[in-house]
Amino acid sequence: MAYLDVQPMMTSLRTTPEDFDMRGSWLRHTPSRHSFKFEPGGHVQIRAECDCAFLMIRPEQERALSDSFDSWRTNYWRPLQINREFASHFRAKSWLRRALIALTTKLNRWLLGHGEEGMTIEAGSVAD
């Protein structure tokens, strides 16, 4: 039986990790538009618009490919996602969001300073 040799993909995961990204639970190779789903038991599903998906992966390479994917996800993808999330914490807010925050802050100060006469706010409760 003919099998698909995935050695070039394993090399690409290691040498050009930026050519891959995740779309949901599928690993996507951007240049070829091939997608791969790695299942818990080490089985790999392939989606491709060409004939690449017609061949099964060599049984001895399927586990190695899964290990290569795990390494890519741990050493490239996860740190990239964490760094993007970290950077988003410091991204400048839009002018609309800044204006709404300023307005909310002013309204809050006004309400705290000009509440109804005879009402006192104490530790989260209202007393007359």
Image (tube, rainbow, N blue to C red):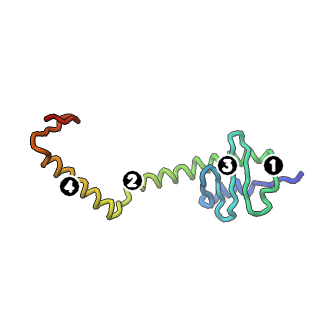
Is disc 2 placed on a helix, strand or loop?
loop
Mark 1 crowdedness (10 Å alpha carbons): few <14, some 14-19, many ≥20: some
- The one nearer the camera, 69 or 119, is 119
Mark nearer the N terminus (2 vs 1): 1
Disc 2 versus disc 1: nearer the observer: 2
- 64 w.r.t. 9: above or below: above
Instruction: Check disc 2 and report the residue beneath it.
Output: 89
Mark nearer the N terminus (4 vs 2): 2
Work out which quarter of the rendered image holds the C terminus and state it: top left
Disc 3 versus disc 4: nearer the observer: 4
Cα gap from disc 2 to disc 1, whole angstroms: 44 Å
Is disc 4 placed on a helix, strand or loop?
helix
Amino acid on which disc 3 is placed = Ser
Is disc 1 placed on a helix, strand or loop?
loop
Amino acid on which disc 4 is placed = Lys
Relative to residue 85, is residue 98 drawn left or right?
left
Place residue 96 in its image quadrant.
bottom left
Q: Residue at x 25, y 58 (%)?
A: 102
Instruction: Check disc 4 and report the residue beneath it.
Output: 106
Mark 4 crowdedness (10 Å alpha carbons): few <14, some 14-19, many ≥20: few
Relative to residue 47, is residue 111 drawn left or right?
left
Cα gap from disc 4 to disc 1, whole angstroms: 66 Å
Question: Disc 3 vs disc 4: Cβ atoms closer than 8 Å?
Answer: no
Instruction: Check disc 1 and report the residue beneath it.
Output: 58
Disc 2 versus disc 3: nearer the observer: 2
Instruction: Check disc 3 and report the residue beneath it.
Output: 68
Relative to residue 94, is residue 2 drawn left or right?
right
Cα gap from disc 3 to disc 4, whole angstroms: 54 Å
Mark 3 crowdedness (10 Å alpha carbons): few <14, some 14-19, many ≥20: some
Cα gap from disc 2 to disc 3, whole angstroms: 31 Å
Q: Residue at x 67, y 49 (%)?
A: 68
Is disc 3 placed on a helix, strand or loop?
helix
